[in-house]
Amino acid sequence: MNRQQFSKYLNGSSMPTLQSLRKICDFFGVESEEMTLPTDQFRALISARERNRKPQSILDDSPAGQRHTRLLENMMQHSAGEIERYLGDYYYYYLTPSYEGHISKSFARLSVKNGICYSHFYEKAEPGQAMLNGYEIGKFVGVVFLLGERLQIIDYGVHCQRAISQTILYGATKGSFSLLSGITLGIQGRNSRIPFASRIVFERISPDIPLRRKLSEIGLFAIDNEIISPAIRARLETPGNLNSPHIFSASEN
């Protein structure tokens, strides 16, 4: 990209074309929608981001590694062909162990690029529970598989790569759907670092709503807050259908 033209983008005298914008976003590891966020939110999302380049063939140095690589690639290819109906934007809700009696309402986007389905999660935390000082809005990115009619998401924090989280959701049983139920497994806040599991609900939302507005509606809410619909609250509070008090399961859709 021409340095002089790029300088015009930086000083605001010119706007990049969609093709140039995509190149810029891919290089810096950001989404084009994030570029429209208020400056403080955008800075919080990217200033701690490290551009770590991993080896392209990290698993290919042995027959076992090559076998694992092929298995992962097959799962990704299979998932990408079946996952189209789940692509789009969601709010997701779960009971957070960091704030007793509160539900975290956060934003998720599922998208496919080059045959791989990715997740982008945005969560808002109180300063004392943020993974890093000054990063109350956290971004988490991951890979999405559709295996055995279950959505399986494995993600990590962009600002602080100290843990990996996993979410498993029931697939939809009919053509159209508004809610998906499941289980999420993660690490509680930066202070205690306790592993936990919680029921989780994904609520599908319109792609026409601007990202800035979607992010403005996320946060922590008391479990009886009217923002949380009865259908979502019931899925988070209702026990699963397994007949054992020692097994934690999700309510079906």
Image (cartoon, grey):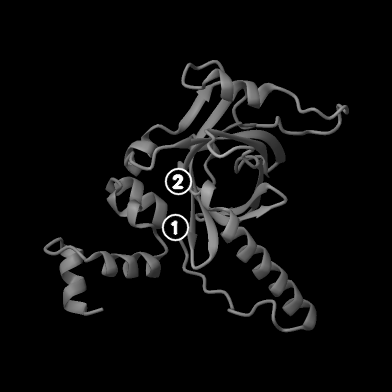
Residue 238: quadrant of the picture:
top right
Q: Residues within 10 Å of mark 2 (few under 14, many from 20)?
A: many
Residue 234 in percent (x, y) is at 63, 21
Q: Residue at x 17, y 62 (%)?
A: 15
The reply, left or right, for residue 82 in relation to residue 16 is right
Q: Residue at x 46, y 21 (%)?
A: 227
Q: Is residue 160 visible?
A: no
Q: Residues within 10 Å of mark 1 (few under 14, many from 20)?
A: few
Q: Looking at the picture, does residue 91 appear above or below residue 22? A: above
Q: Looking at the picture, does residue 62 appear above or below residue 157? A: below
The circle drawn on residue 48 is: 1
Mark 1 vs mark 2: which is more N-terminal? Answer: 1
The reply, left or right, for residue 209 in relation to residue 204 is left
Q: Amino acid at mark 2?
A: Tyr
Return the residue found at the far front.
Answer: 175
The circle drawn on residue 135 is: 2
Q: Nearer the viewer, residue 125 or 106?
A: 106
Q: Residue at x 60, y 43 (%)?
A: 190
Q: Nearer the viewer, residue 57 or 173?
A: 173
Q: CB atoms at circles 1 and 2 under 8 Å apart?
A: yes
The image quadrant where one finds the C terminus is: top right
Secondary structure under the numbered disc 2 in the rendered image: loop
Q: Amino acid at mark 1?
A: Ala
The image quadrant where one finds the N terminus is: bottom left
